[in-house]
Amino acid sequence: EVQMVESGGGLVQPGGSLRLSCAASGFTFSSYWMHWVRQAPGKGLVWVSGIKSDGSTTTYADSVRGRFTISRDNAKNTLYLQTNSLRAEDTAVYYCARGGAWYAFDIWGQGTMVTVSS
Amino acid sequence: QSALTQPASVSGSPGQSITISCTGTSSDVGYYNYVSWYQQHPGKAPKFMIFDVSNRPSGVSNRFVGSKSGNTASLTISGLQAEDEADYYCSSYTTSSTLVFGGGTKVTVL
């Protein structure tokens, strides 16, 4: 079964950091672009970041560039998102998503909640 | 990176057809045919519905049809069913090598 399971979310103070993980199984992880997408409570989807299958190319939304870092470990079938200098507006459910058509998200995890609050 | 523009809500009766628009610019929707659509039920992860403007992944009903004209993409749902009630989001690749979503459209089946 193809699936992705996110972890690492939680409550963090403004200015703090969290490392999100996404464990993939059931497909050849190293063949796909992977992305992070977030959704604030009651709001719409927002693309955050993407990484090429071999990790050679990364791309970020303006709102997180310089604060977040996407990475992957193809040997462990795991995607990461290092989030630094967190702000209240970063509060959201963070989904990892497979880039099935490289730019399109064909498989989604269940999400992990990040809450930035003092 | 402004979000693509979608109507906040669209409604229709069972069996009818509805169309959701997704308006971007010449730097995203109008430049590439890299438009995709997603369905999201409350409390669930989004579901992949359309890619490359008009292609359906395996398992998606042919009642869902995507199209594009200029800077506006559209998703038409025909034969509306109760299970189609959900939020729908469009997405596009941009000339800045980023991706952008629309604000989302809530579909109500009357």
Image (cartoon, coloured by chain):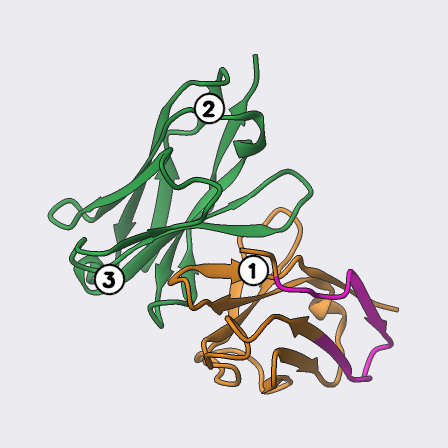
Chain colours: A green, B orange
* Residue B5 sits inside the magenta stretch: yes
Residue A21 seen by the camera: no
Q: Between disc 2 and disc 3, whose residue precedes?
A: 2
Q: Chain of mark 3?
A: A
Give SS at disc 2: strand
Q: Which residues are magenta?
A: B4-20
Check the image and report above or below for A27 versus A25. below
Single out the residue that lies furthest toward the left. Answer: A75
| Dot 3 amino acid type | Phe
- In the rendered structure, the answer to whether residue B75 lies left or right of residue B9 reads left
The percent coordinates of residue A89 (x first, y second) are 58, 32
Do marks 2 and 3 both belong to one polypeptide chain?
yes
- Residue A8 belongs to the span the image colors magenta: no
Q: Nearer the viewer, mark 1 or mark 2?
A: 1
- The numbered dot on residue A27 is 3
Secondary-structure class at tag 1: strand
Q: Assess disc 2: are there few (<14), some (14-19) or many (≥20) residues with their C-alpha within 10 Å of its C-alpha.
A: few
Q: Can you say whether A17 is above or below B42 in the image?
A: above
* Residue in the image at 84% along x and 70% along y: B11
Residue at horizontal 52%, vertical 82%?
A: B53
User: Image quarter for residue B74?
Assistant: bottom right
Residue hosting label 2: A10
Residue B90: give x, y in percent of width and height.
58, 67
Q: Do the residues marked 1 and 2 share a common chain? A: no
Residue B57, quarter of picture: bottom left
Q: Nearer the viewer, mark 3 or mark 1?
A: 1
- Image quarter where the N terminus of chain A lies is bottom left
Q: How many marks?
A: 3
The three-letter code of the residue at mark 2 reads: Gly
Residue at x 36%, y 44% (from the top left corner): A5
Q: Residue at x 62, y 61 (%)?
A: B102
Q: Which mark is residue B101?
A: 1
